[in-house]
Image (spheres, rainbow, N blue to C red):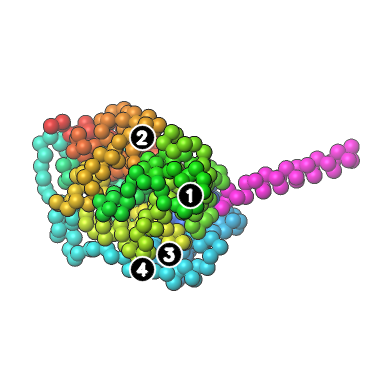
Amino acid sequence: MLRRKIVIPIVLIAVLIIIAKSQYPKLYIASGYGAKSMATAVFVSQRDPQLVQITDLNYSIVKYTKSVIDYERKSVTTSFWGLAKQTAVYREGFGCCLVGDLSADSLQKIAIRLPIYKPDGVWHIAWPNGDLIKDTVYPEIDTLKLKMAVNAAFDSPGEYKKRTAAVVVLYKGELVSEKYAKELGITPDTRIWGWSMTKSIINAMAGVLTRQGKLNIKASAPVPQWLGDRRRDITINNLLQMNSGLKWDENYGDVSTATIMLFRSADSYKVAIDVPYQKAPGTVWNYSSGTSNILSGIMRSLIGNDKVYHEFPYREIFNKIGITSMIVETDASGNFVGSSYSYATARDWARFGLLYYQDGIWKGDTILPKGWVAYTRTPVVASKGEYGAQFWLNKSKKLPDAPEDLFSCQGHRGQRVFIIPSRNLVIVRLGFSEKAFEHNEFVKGILAAIKKN
């Protein structure tokens, strides 16, 4: 009996130790998510950290983390009940990144002055290059229905379910409706996370490089580490369409290649290119954040100059289409985290969608090459009509009440830029959750408010 009393506690302790060891690495995912998100929200978006805690970080086990903000050093250290501490720092021009095993001081010495074109008095420059909105009256729009559809996207007073932050609706290129969750501190000037909508920015960068003759999507991906094995057959097109055949694990509930890349590594490109071969390229579609970061690293190499690379999306895309708030963040190694880290106002996300609605042309300036948007919207065979090139499609009618020609940028926790050419619409919804938010009903309501021409 005495022996049994001794053995049982020992076994329980052993089991607890095994569980703790297996689960402890997951805590770094939570603390990394918390530190990075809080740092960007505070130092890039200038938001109230208390509101950030109940919006951005009220998620999964991240809600149990605690963040300490150092305003003088512009850093955030987050832990899970004092364990698995991770620190993120702000760097001028680069946004925020996790420090990992590197020195925060050395990282913060690296800064750039972004070539953001922001003319004085943007409120006096006509939309879309500025923020002066025309009082255009479209007889086909039922303004009351449109207002009701937009209002329905937000929580009622006292509720916190849909957690929508902002909505912007463009019709025929003009801004016809917008709303912001002011009670959550969101205004037209608030930069809001895009998460995986950043992948669509990678698409735009690839399009510009293609127009410039510096990128050939049919060519093999120029990754030196792949030349000695079967990964040498992977093309740029395979990466854009996410059918590379790499053995990628897009699992955010555990320690995976995705979470290691985003929350444990200083070099997102290196983590992604180290993923092994699994299937022949072009045969299997596998949603992979890693492929977006491989493309980002490839573009860095092709451009061949870090200053030009870091200024590239601003000079070649954002400045030309009136986007002045967008920040695409880098990792500690200087790679754009093309899978996940971009922040902009709702209006600027709408401008990005408008570029694709206008077939890559902006006020007569060809930003994306002819045929690029059509290529972007071409379904990847293995995706069953759900995916194109770093954009989602509605060929499979995942949104049953929306037209099949809808294509969209999509991000974690319900970030969306819907582009519907047949209905002359660009619709932006940004938020902090999508558990209680019905994207189909949202789009359906807006469509119902506008008669077909």
Mark 1 secondary-structure assignment? loop
Quadrant (top left/top right/bottom left/bottom right) for the N terminus: top right
Mark 3 and mark 4 lie on one chain; the one further toward the N terminus is: 3
Question: What secondary structure is the magenta-colored segment mainly?
Answer: helix
| Disc 2 + disc 1, Cβ < 8 Å | no
In the drawing, does residue 326 fall left or right of residue 287? left
Q: Return the x and y of residue 344 as percentages of the image width and height.
A: 32, 54
* Residue 121 visible in rendering: yes
Disc 1 target residue: 227
Which quarter of the figure has residue 125? bottom left
How packed mark 2 is, by other alpha carbons closer than 10 Å (few <14, some 14-19, many 20 or more), is: many
Residue 380 numbered mark, or none: 2
Which span of residues is magenta-colored? 1-28
Q: Nearer the viewer, residue 425 or 334?
A: 334
Mark 1 and mark 3 lie on one chain; the one further toward the N terminus is: 3
Q: Viewer-nearest of labels 4 and 1?
A: 1
Disc 4 versus disc 1: distance between alpha carbons? 34 Å
Mark 2 secondary-structure assignment? loop
Disc 3 target residue: 90
Q: Return the x and y of residue 107 as percentages of the image width and height.
A: 47, 68
What residue is drawn where x is 30% and y is 57%? 313
Mark 3 and mark 2 lie on one chain; the one further toward the N terminus is: 3
Disc 4 target residue: 112
Mark 2 and mark 1 lie on one chain; the one further toward the N terminus is: 1
Q: Return the x and y of residue 67 as percentages of the image width and height.
A: 51, 58
Task: Tell me the amino acid under the disc marked 4.
Answer: Ile
Task: Tell me the amino acid under the disc marked 2.
Answer: Val
Mark 4 and mark 2 lie on one chain; the one further toward the N terminus is: 4
In the drawing, does residue 310 fall left or right of residue 279? left
Q: Viewer-nearest of labels 2 and 1?
A: 1
| Disc 1 + disc 3, Cβ < 8 Å | no
